[in-house]
Amino acid sequence: MRDEARVTQYAIRDTRYAIRLLGVIVIAYLAIAAQYAARTPAWQVPDEPAHYNYVRTIVENRALPVLNFGDYDQAFNQQFTNPANTPDLSIDPLRYEFHQPPLYYLLAAPIYAITGGNLLTLRLVSVAFGGALIVVAFLIVREITPARPELALGTAAFVAFVPQHVAMMAGVNNDSLAELLLALILFQTLRVLRLRAEGELKELFALGVLLGLGLITKTTDYLAVPVVCVAVLTRVAYRLSLIADRSVSLVTRHSSPATRHLSLVFAPALLLGSLWWLRNLGAYGGFDILGLARHNAVVVGQPLTSDWIAGMGFGPFLASALTTTFHSFWGQFGWMGVPMPEWVYLGLGALSIAAVVGWLWTLREAHINPILPHPHTLLFLLTLLAFAAYIWYNLTFVQHQGRYLFPALIPLGLVFAIGIERWTRLLPHPIGLVVYVCAFVALAALDVYALYRFVIPALVV
């Protein structure tokens, strides 16, 4: 009895200590991201003017905008993205994000109205969403590995301090809310997997509401739909196996749990989503419920993958695509015009390779298949879908921007934390812990260094 009390005491102490460290991570992120928001020149976050114009249109016209032909001008966009030109050019022609789902912009509209469209205030709204995302990342990993708080903290720190992610969270765009909702959907899905019968209806309905909010925030959140389906059907199969073990009559009585569970999740999700889809049917016609067909027709002049391959050859194109993706995942600022020096990318590459090798090492030692355990299946599936969506988009348009992989940032952060932690186990305990912490402190330091050494000198004119 005394031993059990001691274990419980240590668990509580670890939890409180972990929460304090999480608070340090969030505060550090808020301080750094606020600097990015304040010091990055206006309109030098990718697509920020178009997102800002969406909010402005809602406030001024009291209606959601419609994407029309003429809302995208490739020549003007190229001219605008040059920081030397931006101060003298109007943002009015930049309207190509008007097809986006509306939730982020509806939430930002009152802030715009109250502050008169103050850019810094709107940026700080995104910063706040990013801070909440860090907390949810921590909760997700604690849900999966409750006995390993260092992995939850490492994942949270990774989400907090990837430089490009900080830069994007400090701009006016719907990425921050979309990532937060995707993380909340994943967290609630993990909770649903371990539910007992009591309370499951409420939790399934809550999952459906979160999923519906994601559907009206950004199309990247649609990646959650197959993840949720797999989780719900897995849970139903498990429940049926338990019922079958008890009696055949119970199986007959509960013959359609899959339908009931899926209905509880997808009824509220589809109801929320349909509000947006029906509006788009009226605005764009046909079956263009997401406005993507209109978007593809409007963005005439955007670089095409087929043209680049024809001009460069497939081998050089692929090498360039992979290099640019890696660089811009970690940090290629402004409108992709401000890379970091090659030595930074070499260091990040070495760190990434070490993390992946350490992760694979951990799996091999533990004899864990990353696909079979339920929580790992969901993380693996989300990552696979994020990479597949990235590749699919780049089959048509040249968009080698690593930030499009950020929907999988939490699973990638967990891989990074597991991998780095495995290497630190080779060191004596206090030294290994210090090295583990230093890996994430180095990322935070790189954020500050990149802002003042690369971003501001390149973009402030």
Image (cartoon, rainbow, N blue to C red):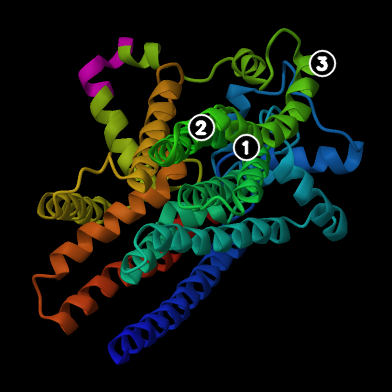
Q: How many numbered circles does the render carry?
A: 3
Q: Name the residue under label 1.
A: 265
Indicate the position of residue 23 as horizontal and vertical percent values: 50, 76
Residue at x-position 54% and y-position 30%? 258
What's the CA distance linking mark 1 and mark 2?
27 Å
What's the CA distance linking mark 3 and mark 1?
27 Å
Indicate the position of residue 184 as horizontal and vertical percent values: 56, 51
Residue at x-position 59% and y-position 32%? 262
Identify the amino acid type marked 1. Val
Q: How crowded is mark 1: few (under 14 residues within 10 Å), some or many (20 or more)?
A: many
Q: Name the residue under label 2.
A: 249
328 drawn magenta: no
SS for tag 3?
helix
Q: How crowded is mark 2: few (under 14 residues within 10 Å), some or many (20 or more)?
A: few
User: Which label's residue is closer to the chain start, 1 or 2?
Assistant: 2
Identify the amino acid type marked 3. Gly
Indicate the position of residue 252 as horizontal and vertical percent values: 53, 28
Find the magenta span and give its range: 310-317
| Residue 396, numbered circle | none
Query: Which marked residue is nearer to the observer: mark 2 or mark 3?
Result: 2
Q: Mark 3 points at which residue?
A: 282
Residue at x-position 16% and y-position 55%? 362
Q: In this rendering, would 159 be left or right of 73? A: left
Q: Residues within 10 Å of mark 3 (few under 14, many from 20)?
A: few
Q: Is the magenta stretch mostly helix, strand or loop?
A: helix
